[in-house]
Image (cartoon, grey):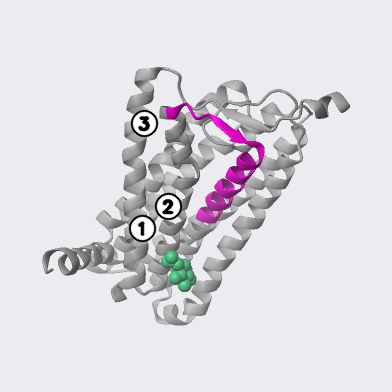
Amino acid sequence: MEELNETHVTEFILLGITDLPHLQVILFITFLIFYLLSFIGNLSIVALVITDRGLHTPMYFLLGNLSFLDFFYATTTVPKLLSCLVFEDKKISFEGCIVQLHIFHFLGSTEAMLLASMSYDRYVAICNPLRYHVLMARAACFQLAFTSWLIGFLYSLTHTILTSKLPFCNMNKITHFYCDIKPLLKLACTDTHINESLVNILTGSVALGTFTLIIISYIFIATHIQKIQTQHGRSKALSTCTSHLTVVFLYYGTAFCTYLRPATKDSLEQDRLTAILFTVITPALNPIIYALRNKDVKKAFRKFFRENLFLK
Ligand SMILES: *[C@@H]1O[C@H](CO)[C@@H](O)[C@H](O)[C@H]1NC(C)=O
């Protein structure tokens, strides 16, 4: 036991994505573009939701929360990944690693719950429009958002505490580009079967639970939309859901691919690839999906440009 303590790991090495120099340059440029997109896109949506009166509704408050979250979500991993690619800056302290793991899972799970809250909002708006302002009053909306953030935090704290208590002896090379649970479990010098099952159970219940809520909301929405007689009424009801549904599919598609599989050596390799999707690409796509597909957001963007760029 004493010997183990002497070689206790104080820092980790993130192996990143590739060692091939020319590929590193290409990846750096690509990821940088995506990061800038998600930086500008998400912060613009937050700014619009706060300043534009047309967007002061529950749906857009929740969208503002989602964009706010996506911005930090990308910022937790991408800058480190970029500096890993160009400066070969691969070291991360033990504490830094645990903090990154915590924030990453905190934001990741909160996103799932915000997406579920947004589908509940759509369900009420479409199936129960007369009571929308009662059911989604400011206080209720605030509670939905707050509960999402709180549960996300506690959920992630469980992972963080369990992972930080693991003994790490002499292996410190993480086969990933950020600190995630499964790659860390592989490095621990102890039997991690219980941890692994817990990760699967916890992650599975959050993912499946929120996904089920979303599916149920959309089953109600779909049956309701079927009953609408006019084509115009139908497409109007649908149009407020399509951007949310697209974001939902992006999120759950990648999440299920990564977390609901056992941690074998091959799957860790694949995990790195799907992780690029949800750390680098999805946070950049979410605001674009909303900016292109949602009429109110489009209108707010146009108004913003007219007032701030062209008339001054
Ligand atoms: C997040 O949602 C809450 C609840 O409606 C809202 O008050 C807050 O302004 C939102 N935050 C952002 C950044 O949109």
**Separation (CA) of disc 3 from disc 1:** 22 Å
Judged from the image, the quadrant occupied by ligand 1 is bottom left
Mark 2 element type: helix
The label on residue 8 is: none
Q: Is residue 114 above or below residue 286?
A: below
* Label 3 C-beta lies within 8 Å of the nearest ligand 1 atom: no
The question of residue 95 being in magenta is answered with yes
Residue 165 locus on image (x, y percent)? 76, 40
Q: CA distance from mark 3 to mark 2?
A: 19 Å
Residue 177 point in image, percent of width and height: 51, 32
Q: Tell whether 116 sits left or right of 168.
A: left
Q: Considering only order in the chain, which callout, 2 or 3, is on the residue closer to the N terminus?
A: 3
Number of other residues with Cα within 10 Å of mark 2, as a class: few under 14, some 14 to 19, many 20 or more: many
Furthest toward the right, the residue is 1
* Distance from mark 2 CB to nearest ligand 1 atom below 8 Å: no
Which comes before the other along the chain, label 3 or label 1?
Answer: 3
Quadrant assignment for the C terminus: bottom left
Q: Is residue 220 visible?
A: no
Q: Mark 3 sits on what residue?
A: 28
- Where are the magenta residues, as a range? 87-112
Q: Residue 115: x and y, percent?
A: 47, 57
Magenta stretch holds residue 176: no
Q: Is residue 169 above or below residue 216?
A: above
Q: Which residue corresponds to mark 2?
A: 71
Instruction: Say which quadrant the N terminus sits in.
Output: top right
Q: Mark 1 — residue? A: 43
Asked whether disc 3 touches disc 1, contact meaning CB atoms under 8 Å apart, the reply is no
Q: Are marks 1 and 2 in contact (CB under 8 Å)?
A: yes
